[in-house]
Image (spheres, rainbow, N blue to C red):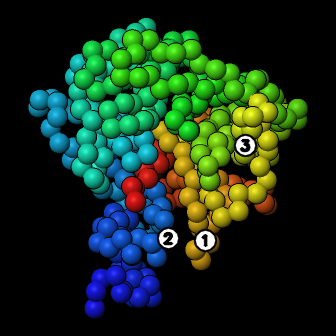
Amino acid sequence: MLTSDLPPELAGLILRWLPWQLDRLNFRAVCRQWRRRLPPSLPLICLNNGKFQSLTVDEPPRRRLTPPDLLGGTVAACFGCYDDWLLYCDVLGAVHRRRCFLLNPLSGATMADITLPPSDYSESGIFPVRKVIVCSPDLIAAKFTGAIGFYRLGAQSWLVCEGWYMEDITLYQGKIYAVNHNNELFAQELPGEKDAVVKLSKLAIMADRLSSSDLGLRAYLVVSCGKLLMVRWSLPSRERSSAKRLKTTEGTKLRVYEADLEMGRWLEVNDLDSQAIFIGRGCSKALCLKGDDPRFQGNRVYFLGSDFRDCFPWLRHVDTPSYGFYDIRSGTTSKIFLSARLAMDVWRMEWFFPCE
């Protein structure tokens, strides 16, 4: 029997004996026909210590990847996860002189010889990179503390736009879009190979409070079914003072808005259909989930425990979930606890989306 003739029922039985997600990815990679028949791969949780955590309770917890030596023997540590790329930097040099490289642990692809740009926002001793987007095989975009920059492999320096205090950025229709705390959306052209400066950004959507009754918290940009969406944590304004006093998360919502670029406005979305949105500081992504597993369904927004704790810093470690989801239709939030010590050991989590 040819591998392409494997019945879906038999493929499902095989998957049941492969509890670890990376083993399932290897199974999917054997045959293109199998990938078409199987549901999309769920993301893993990448921990700041370089290990991974599966989303299901019955799978082995955490595996560590050993990065290749691309920094000349110096000590490299994982400083972030962005889509299916991991950012490694040497931990011995000054923050603004660290050499870095991006690694795709599944394909083995690397983007090496990346030097962080020297600037005021990196001299505080805090690692400045907040998000990295691989725009092309030789161009990356990054969100720093108060700036957005572009780096082309082999270039002598970064092209940096300072003064950008953005909550999130994403790549959409060949441009970098950025949103700030006022819900202003900016569109930034990607620099060409010979560009020495970054072109001025354009305001795509003006400031909009969106809801007079809600207090907007952190925002995320994500592309779903060809549309640019913004997901924002919100808390009823009437609950703001009582939330601080009682330290409660009651009434918290995750509101979803679509960017109407033609009219320059945000439109609230109340139905995602089969789409599930995974939001995170390093990467946000939409997946089509139609399976029978009640834990992973469409019309939900999945969030990470570290982000939840950042929005509500009064939470105790034992009350911080590994991850959770907000159901768009019911307006309810569910928390998932995979390990009692997971939230205590990890100060930052990111989604790792295996490439198909």
**Where residue 315 is drawn, which disc sits there?**
none
Please tell me whether mark 3 sits on a helix, a strand or a loop.
strand
Q: Residues within 10 Å of mark 3 (few under 14, many from 20)?
A: some
- The residue nearer to you, when weighing 186 against 338, is 186
Dot 2 or dot 3: first in sequence order is 2
Q: CA distance from mark 1 to mark 2?
A: 8 Å
Residue at x 36%, y 43% (from the top left corner)? 85
Please tell me whether mark 1 sits on a helix, a strand or a loop.
loop
Residue at x 65%, y 46% (from the top left corner)? 227
Q: Quadrant of residue 311?
A: top right
Residue behind mark 3 = 258
Please tell me whether mark 2 sits on a helix, a strand or a loop.
loop
Residue at x 64%, y 20% (from the top left corner)? 202
Tell me the amino acid under the disc marked 2. Pro
Residue behind mark 2 = 39
The correct choice, above or below, for 305 with respect to 133 in the image is below
